Amino acid sequence: MKVIVTVIGKDKPGIIAKVSTALAQNNVNIEDISQTIMQGNFTMLMQCDIEKASLTLKGLKSALLSLGEEIGVSIHVQHEDIFNAMHKI
Amino acid sequence: MLNRKEILETIDMVEKEHFDVRTITMGISLLPCVREDAKTTAELCYDRICQKAEKIVKVASDLEAEYGIPIINKRVSITPASLLTSSFCGKEVTLAKALDRAAKTVGVDFLGGYSALVQKGMTSYERSFIESIPEALAVTDRMCSSVNVGSSKAGINMDAVRLMGEIIKATAEKTKERDGFGCAKLVVFCNAVEDNPFMAGAFHGLSEGETVINVGVSGPGVVHHALKSMKGASVDEIAETIKKTAFKITRAGQLIAKEASKRLNAEFGIVDLSLAPTPVMGDSVAHILEEIGLDSVGGHGTTAALAMLNDAVKKGGVMASSNVGGLSGAFIPVSEDIGMIRAAEKGAISLSKLEAMTCVCSVGIDMVAVPGDTPATTLAGMIADEAAIGMINNKTTAVRVIPVPNKGVGDTVEFGGLLGTAPIMEVSPYGCSSFINRGGRMPAPIHSNKN
């Protein structure tokens, strides 16, 4: 299953490192990544494959949610189909 | 890789604009459960609902987690119950209790379909069933009831209209310690649809399959937000933006509906494109109309703005879903929409204006509280007016009105949760009892003869 991980919050050093470490620890493969600063906010989008992940999607969501709280950013994990459905004809 | 702007737009819709899937409703045919006695029928219905809808809450929670779109309600709709009770007249409430118990066991928010379809004629068992509604709504918590009293094809059953005026009064009286709350779960239709996922009017029509998933999307907040940046834009530009927004939210609903039906081993029925408000700030249909340019919903221009909104939502939604159905339009329930509540409080909206609005949008006089001493025949008059609008214009209309016992204009009634708060609205002091008491059947309009 392909998911989109979205990380939004106040910029500071180490966000990419911490999020990608957490993904690696759970055997989630990052296939594409894009990061920028939008209106002063750190904004990162990652397309990930969770086929071989050691956690279920729900488990991964809650792991990243607590990581997000720890480093002060909001992290969403969503199946990529929702974006395809809403924005592609 | 997906477009960044699009991903963030979806996230903002959920986080800031209250975008959600309002309901996943499983329609279940209960015809195989009919037996001669009330107890056995009730037990079989209970078992069948529990078996078919066993996983609905879990599947909804899984989908919510996977797609990141909140799914607010899980519901069940059933075969109109008047078709199940013909052999045990007088004992219908036994079935009502079992249905309510089933709703609680599977964990759904509401179960709809304690219903009768009497638009042309009313059998003795249907009359007995309708007479059981006040008691049935008083002794249950999650069960909803509806009665269809007219259609464009059959005309309006004025005997049923008169009876429903009395039934609404009796329901309010039976639930008077909760300000007539039972009436919030009772809707009277003209041209009721068989695949409506929304309450209180959902039932599983006779032409439906065995188990069907119907999904109702929502998103007044998303539409409102999209219009905020359009100050000074022309009406056709506004309509275009609403269309595009409706397309996106319906696509999300379509995806959820397809997945839900697959996982629940049910047929995919329809996506209902209604804009359904909640009493929460930022989730109001009235505020969309005000964003379009009205000083207050209820003023002149309201009907026109609503007509455009309703039509644009449908146009966007129709292209987004393979099967569109249900009510599909903007809802204007007074107590469930913060903008409507405010307008009613300051006297900006009247029952007459609401009636005009129902000519161009979904449903009708919805969640309106009126004085407790409103005569049953006046309530029947309201029903007749709405049914006439529906019958003549080939559309669904409805009345869900609460004559709040011992309260009058100036009082407010609090239903809580999604049902909200309703200021009691003034009804016309001029009655129509002689008209209503004539009874009989209003013939179908000339344009029903299409063959």
Image (cartoon, coloured by chain):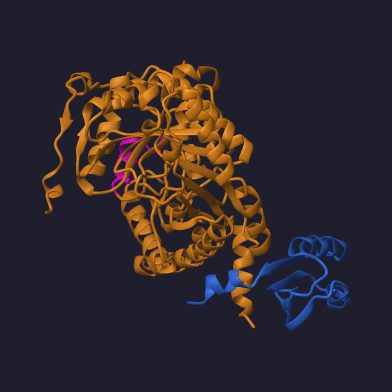
Q: Is residue B269 left or right of residue A31?
A: left
On the image, the x and y values in percent for residue B26 come to: 51, 48
Quarter where residue B149 is shown:
top left
Picture quarter with the C terminus of chain B: bottom left
Q: In the figure, the blue chain has which letter?
A: A
Residue at 64% over, 73% down: A80
Give the vertical position of B309 relative to A79 (above or below): above
**Quadrant of image for the N terminus of chain B:** bottom right
Q: Residue at x 61, y 35 (%)?
A: B104
**B409 left or right of A73?**
left
**Magenta region, residue range:** B346-359
Q: Position of residue B284 (x, y in %)?
A: 50, 49
Q: Number of marks in the image?
A: 0
Horizontal side of residue B329 vs A81, given as left or right = left
| Visible residue check, residue B129 | no
**Would you say residue B349 sits in the magenta stretch?**
yes
| B14 in relation to B142, above or below | below
Q: Residue B389 location in percent, x, y?
A: 24, 42
**Which one is nearer the viewer's eye here, B421 or B121?**
B121
Q: Is residue A88 visible?
A: yes
Q: Nearer the viewer, residue B436 or B242?
A: B436
Residue at screen point 37% across, 68% down: B234
Residue at 55% in and 22% down: B178
Pick whichever, B177 or B345, lies toward us.
Answer: B177
The chain assigned the colour orange in the figure is: B
Q: Is residue B338 magenta?
A: no
Give percent across and percent down for residue B14. Answer: 62, 60
